[in-house]
Image: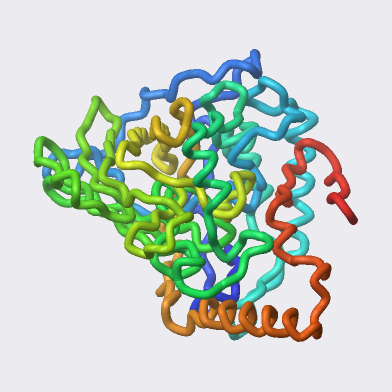
Amino acid sequence: MSHRRFASRLVLGACAAASLAVLASPATLWGQERPADLTVLPPVPTDYTPKKTEWGDWDFRGIWPIERINEGHILFQRPKAYGNRFWVTDEEFNRRVEAAKGNDGSFAAASDSGIGAPGTEGLAEWFQTSNFGKRTSMLVSPADGQLPPLTPEGEALYKAGRSGWVPGQDYDWLSDFDSWDRCVSRGFPASMYPFRYNNGIRVFQSPGYVVIALEMLGTRVIPLGDQPAWPGPVEAWMGDSRGHWEGKTLVIETTNIKSGDSATHDTQKRSASPLNMATQLVPPFNTIPMSTEAKTVERLTMTGPNTIVHELTYSDPKVYTKPWTTRIEWTRDDDYQFFEYACHEGNHMPRDYISASRAHRAALAKGEADPNAPDDRDRFAQPFDHDPGTGPRPPRPGS
């Protein structure tokens, strides 16, 4: 059995999911082998032919959790230790496998409350049966594995943004919290990347539509073909998507993503960040803005009966100086269980933060609190994710 870790925001309840439906050789699981030149990323292989649905579309239906990427600490941006390589060496890969064995060895079943199950189960096996376990990062363009710089306008709005994660910030109203704090949305395309828990993806298909249901805060209904898009002013947290087939690849173009920033005090004009800091090694604070020109192009290609390669290119010329592209692997596990993500129910966090912030300011005014006391949110400003392939974890600043 494969168990997932839960955080305190999740609805109570035990959660267990079975191991991969089919464990095969690496070539069967994912057809893209690591090349001899580790600085080269070959094209996505298209030699696998999926089954077809009853109405003739390629059949992508199933459950495709991306939990292993999170558990294995394959980070969004490339750790500097890997230089210009898309792939790890054998020595680096072996360090990942050994770390995965240690995580598997510390596994314990979830308690009756479903919270706090330590360790992993089957992670080492995933590394040894998936060539994605040899990749240095999710980000593949720019080629250095780093996000491109923000524009001056984007940088100013990012630094001025407010959320529950920003050091030194006081809280007075809902406009001081991001959409994830408020259980509204993780943002898009942020929702398509692994988080620290609840990484299930379920694909449904019917004639003319593909539906991508996400375990945490998000369902995308994607019409296929020439159906017209919603008019520009109609925006949605997950955007407005249209899909079509290019050979055996499903191509999805998404526009009309909820635009705005995190600096405004108008909650109706606040956007979600396109990248959420719960994905390992992305910019902190969830305050990256999004303009009306934001767009994604996704390409989903089955490379074997139990794998889909998901490519996503994000462009927003008012915020980023150039587009960026990711390539990750979805692995089939049709026994993976979805439970209700009851986030709004019992979400007292914004109210409690506001009450505590006002009480703290009152105590400061009375001289009853230390104005120089450490801010525990400072830790979010520093990367705290570590890829074991790069070697031992370095000491954190100030430790």
Horizontal and vertical percent position of residue 383 = 71, 48
Q: Quadrant of the C terminus?
A: bottom right
Horizontal and vertical percent position of residue 21 = 46, 53
Q: Nearer the viewer, residue 294 or 115?
A: 294
Measuring 51% from the left and 33% from the top, which residue is drawn there?
Answer: 152
Is residue 67 at all visible to an observer of this figure?
no
Establish if 349 lies above or below 33: below
Say whether residue 306 is left or right of residue 378. Answer: left
Q: Nearer the viewer, residue 359 or 386?
A: 359
Measuring 25% from the left and 52% from the top, which residue is drawn there?
Answer: 235
Measuring 10% from the left and 40% from the top, which residue is drawn there?
Answer: 228
Establish if 142 lies above or below 36: below
Q: Which quadrant holds residue 121?
A: bottom right
Establish if 205 lies above or below 132: below
Horizontal and vertical percent position of residue 220 = 28, 54
Number of labels in the image equals 0
Say whether residue 206 is left or right of residue 76. Answer: left
Q: Quadrant of the N terminus?
A: bottom right
Is residue 383 at all visible to an observer of this figure?
yes
Q: Residue furthest top?
A: 37
Q: Which quadrant holds residue 219?
A: bottom left
Establish if 116 lies above or below 288: below
Q: Nearer the viewer, residue 323 or 332?
A: 323
Horizontal and vertical percent position of residue 125 = 64, 47
Q: What colouring method underlies this structural image?
A: rainbow
Measuring 24% from the left and 44% from the top, which residue is drawn there?
Answer: 241
Q: Which quadrant holds residue 134?
A: top right
